[in-house]
Image (cartoon, rainbow, N blue to C red):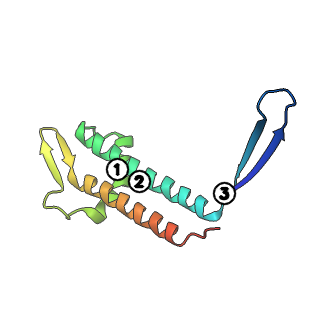
Amino acid sequence: MVDERRVVTRTEVVAPVAPTSVSQSEVTYRSNGSSVLQRLIIFLFALIQGLLILRIVLLLVAARQGNDLVALIHDVSDLFVAPFRGILGRSQIPAGSTELDVAAIVALVGWTIVELIILGFLRVFRRTT
């Protein structure tokens, strides 16, 4: 919600100079519940999308699965990839020691669409003043 207050001060000059006006605007921003909820949803989905991107990159560079951090990222991101696994005929495309995780790419697109749908519903039911 934006509250705007406008203060206009006019100063007349007696000399042959044209009259001048000074305009000053003050804009005050206040967060309402809807905007806070939208920011929270965007933050949560950004975490999911970042995790999926990390998974894709780590599999592309053939990161060692024995590393604890790589294993943690793979295990946690697997929760978000699982609903989208099997949509396409192949879940992974191997290329030597690296692999392209097609299911993770589909999941990235899918979670982005879910985020946009949720944000769209919030905008539809938002109160306007």
Tag 2–tag 1 contact (CB < 8 Å): yes
Q: Residues within 10 Å of mark 3 (few under 14, many from 20)?
A: few
Residue 99 in the figure: left or right of residue 121? left
> Residue visible at 76% across and 31% down?
18
Of callouts 3 and 1, which one flags the residue occurring earlier in the amino acid sequence? Answer: 3
In what element is the residue under mark 2? helix
Name above or below for residue 118 compared with residue 56. Answer: below
Tell me the residue at 87%/30% (across/down): 14
Q: Nearer the viewer, mark 3 or mark 2?
A: 3
Asked if one can make out residue 99 in the rendered structure from this viewpoint, the answer is yes
* Residue type (three-letter) at the residue carrying disc 1: Leu
Residue that label 3 marks: 31
Label 3 or label 2, whichever comes before in sequence order: 3
Residue placed under numbered mark 2 in the picture: 48
Name the residue: 18% across, 44% down. 99
Where the C terminus falls, by quadrant?
Answer: bottom right
The amino acid beneath tag 3 is Ser
Say which element carries label 1.
helix
How far apart marks 3 and 2 lie (CA) works out to 25 Å
Where does label 1 land, which residue? Answer: 52
User: Are the residues tagged 3 and 1 within 8 Å (C-beta)?
Assistant: no
Residue farthest toward the front in the current orientation of the protein: 16
